[in-house]
Image (tube, rainbow, N blue to C red):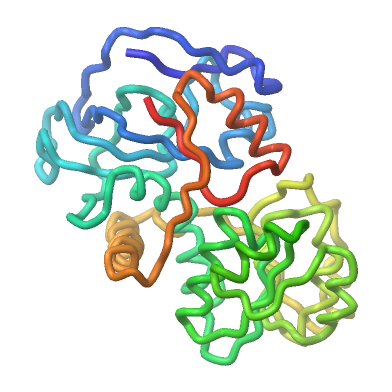
């Protein structure tokens, strides 16, 4: 089988398309014939060294496919099942070894490709809108990068909860996508802080350095900044007194793994997502599909913000 490995961290050029022997499952593990692997910014952080890894390693944190083998002690997963996963390294491959406890069943009515596209970003959007800040009817919500895969999901879930949603984008084409996702108002990055100053209950920011200061300006007293990513670069150190001066603000830097640490919570979030997708309440916009061998191009396109929606690698 083929996989993408990283032997030295760096730019997209370090992604190697190599051939490996087919894997076998260990105790509590399954092997999945991968139908699709999601491409996410965390993969760029793993590749670049922003998140150090033990090398060499296969990367990719999300996917879906058909179970082809099960290891000893696996009881709830069988050969032939369609499953999906997130936060499991090694997903950029034709066959992936997955801990059985991290695999979730994909129901009828949801394709493996859609499941792969939904898992990491979908569950992130779920915990941000249902746990980090439980969006309520009438909340004023700001979603940065509203045309991206995460942005479109956050807009949709916040609207399902009854919020008024503002989104930022960089182009007219991206404005159209954010509005199609349900954004009530769409703004450019220049001047968004002045336009929304003091109006917003929660800011969902995956952009980071370029938008962070402005995001604090738009929050109401006791508002929440959920900084879940740093596509434009890391945010500089912040004096906590700043949060006091701007209205006793809350700041959190959450990550998905802590919101799906227990299997019950993982299954609940995934079940909600797949239910909304099957019911037509949540649309997954898969905008780009690349052959597995073209992982380098996918990383280049994502980093350069040449894409909208979700990117998939197809083995």
Q: Quadrant of the N terminus?
A: top left
Judge left or right: residue 236 versus residue 123: right
The structure residue drawn at horizontal position 41% and vertical position 52%, both measured from the top left corner, is: 118
Q: How many labels does the image show?
A: 0
263 over 25 or under it: above or below: below
- Regarding residue 252, the answer to whether it shows in the image is no
Q: Where is residue 284 in the image (x, y as percent from the top left)?
A: 43, 57
Judge left or right: residue 118 versus residue 54: left
Query: In the current view of this chain or complex, which residue is farthest to the bottom?
Result: 138
283 over 182 or under it: above or below: above
Judge left or right: residue 51 versus residue 60: right
289 over 177 or under it: above or below: above
21 over 74 or under it: above or below: above
Q: Quadrant of the C terminus?
A: top left
Which image quadrant is residue 276 in? bottom left
Front one among 133 and 95: 95
The structure residue drawn at horizontal position 67% and vertical position 30%, both measured from the top left corner, is: 300
The structure residue drawn at horizontal position 38% and vertical position 14%, both measured from the top left corner, is: 2
Judge left or right: residue 244 versus residue 314: right
The structure residue drawn at horizontal position 83% and vertical position 68%, both measured from the top left corner, is: 240
Q: Where is residue 259 in the image (x, y as percent from the top left)?
A: 45, 59
Q: Position of residue 60 (x, y in %)?
A: 48, 32
- Regarding residue 63, the answer to whether it shows in the image is yes
Q: Where is residue 283 in the image (x, y as percent from the top left)?
A: 42, 62
Which image quadrant is residue 173 in? bottom right
């Amino acid at each position: 089988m083929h996989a993408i490995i990283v032997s030295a961290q760096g730019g997209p050029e370090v992604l190697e398309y190599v051939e490996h022997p087919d894997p076998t499952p260990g105790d509590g593990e399954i092997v999945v014939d991968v139908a699709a692997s999601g491409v996410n910014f965390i993969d760029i952080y793993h590749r670049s060294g922003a998140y150090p890894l033990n090398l060499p390693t296969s990367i990719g944190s999300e996917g879906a496919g058909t179970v082809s083998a099960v290891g000893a002690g696996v009881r709830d997963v069988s050969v032939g099942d369609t499953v999906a996963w997130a936060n499991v390294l090694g997903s950029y491959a034709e066959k992936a070894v997955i801990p059985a406890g991290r695999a979730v069943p994909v129901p009828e009515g949801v394709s493996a490709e859609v499941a792969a596209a939904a898992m990491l970003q979908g569950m992130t959007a779920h915990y941000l809108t249902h746990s980090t800040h439980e969006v309520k009817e009438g909340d004023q919500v700001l979603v940065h990068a509203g045309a991206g895969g995460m942005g479109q999901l956050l807009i949709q879930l916040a609207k399902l909860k009854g919020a008024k949603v503002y989104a930022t984008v960089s182009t007219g084409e991206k404005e159209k996508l954010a509005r199609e996702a349900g954004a009530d108002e769409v703004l450019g990055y220049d001047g968004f802080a002045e336009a929304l100053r003091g109006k917003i209950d929660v800011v969902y920011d995956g952009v980071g350095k370029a938008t962070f200061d402005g995001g604090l300006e738009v929050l109401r007293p006791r508002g929440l900044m959920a900084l879940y990513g740093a596509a434009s670069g890391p945010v500089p150190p912040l004096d906590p007194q700043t949060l006091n001066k701007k209205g006793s603000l809350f700041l959190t830097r959450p990550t998905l793994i802590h919101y799906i640490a227990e299997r019950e919570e993982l299954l609940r979030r995934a079940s909600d997502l797949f239910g909304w997708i099957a019911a037509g309440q949540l649309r997954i916009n898969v905008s780009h599909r690349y052959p597995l061998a073209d992982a380098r191009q996918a990383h280049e396109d994502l980093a350069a913000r040449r894409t909208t929606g979700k990117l998939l690698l197809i083995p």
